[in-house]
């Protein structure tokens, strides 16, 4: 019973960590979108003067948060399959290192970008930088909440194997 409860608790922690990681990644994507959108919309000179004002940062922050919440829903739909595969691999292999989660986050983000582009289109350098930053931030936040304990639920498996059908340990049953 303890194994089942630890697996259920682990799934709850993974879902929460995935939610936070995707929200953080979408905020990075939204910052890249909103800063580029404002620069294109206002022009280079006007965007530079907007940056110098007090309320310029506030406008950029509000736009980033608004766009971030909207893009998080789209990001969940696009990134769910590669992220679930990465989480399953790290849990089964007990990979709990930060670098592993950063790399898998970046690979998942690149997978999403390259599968969503039309054939023959290569993403620009800025798109790749924002995509990798988005994947790394998502991987870091996932590691921070759930990734450090990847595979810890498997520690209960040897104790379960050592029990016989009556729930006694095999050492006690032989006496």
Image (cartoon, grey):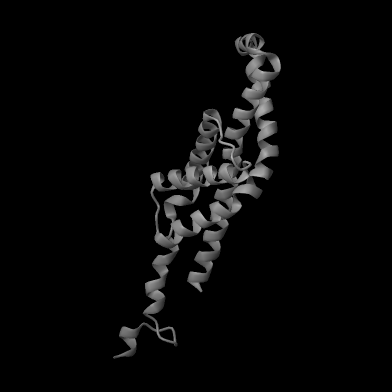
Residue 67 is left or right of residue 16, and the answer is right
Q: Name which quarter of the figure residue 63 lies in.
A: top right
- Residue 119's place in the image compared with 85, above or below, is above
User: In which image quadrant can residue 172 be found?
Assistant: bottom left
* Residue 26 in which image quadrant: top right
* Residue 162 percent coordinates (x, y): 36, 79
At 69% across and 15% down in the image, what residue appears? 42
Tally of numbered discs = 0
Residue toward you, 170 or 139 = 139
Q: Where in the figure is residue 48, as x and y percent of width and height?
A: 61, 11
Q: Position of residue 135 (x, y in %)?
A: 52, 41
Q: Residue furthest bottom?
A: 175
Left or right of residue 100, residue 24 in this image: right
Q: Is residue 19 above or below residue 121?
A: below
Q: Looking at the image, which residue is at 57% across and 39% down?
A: 25
At which x and y percent is residue 148? 42, 50
What is the residue that sits farthest to the left in this orientation? 175
> Looking at the image, which residue is at 37% across and 73% down?
158
Instruction: State which quarter of the image contains the C terminus.
Output: bottom left
- Residue 1's place in the image compared with 113, above or below, is below
Of residue 53 and residue 90, the one placed in the foreground of this image is 90
Q: Write the residue at 47% across / 45% down.
A: 144
Residue in front for this viewpoint, 98 or 165? 98
Left or right of 40 in this view: 113 = left
């Amino acid at each position: 019973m303890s194994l089942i409860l630890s697996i259920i608790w682990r799934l709850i922690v993974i879902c929460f960590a995935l939610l936070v990681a995707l929200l953080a990644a979408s905020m990075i994507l939204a910052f890249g979108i909103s800063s580029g959108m404002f620069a294109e919309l206002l022009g280079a000179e006007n965007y530079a003067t907007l940056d110098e004002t007090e309320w310029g940062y506030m406008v950029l922050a509000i736009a980033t948060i608004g766009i971030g919440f909207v893009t998080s829903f789209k990001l969940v739909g696009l990134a769910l399959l590669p992220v679930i595969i990465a989480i399953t691999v790290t849990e089964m292999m007990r990979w709990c290192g930060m670098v592993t989660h950063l790399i898998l986050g970046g690979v998942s983000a690149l997978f999403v970008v390259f599968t969503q582009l039309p054939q023959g289109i290569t993403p620009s350098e800025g798109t790749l930088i924002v995509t990798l930053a988005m994947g790394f931030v998502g991987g870091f936040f996932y590691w921070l909440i759930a990734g450090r304990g990847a595979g810890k639920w498997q520690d209960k498996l040897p104790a379960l194997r050592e029990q016989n059908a009556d729930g006694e340990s095999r050492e006690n049953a032989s006496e």
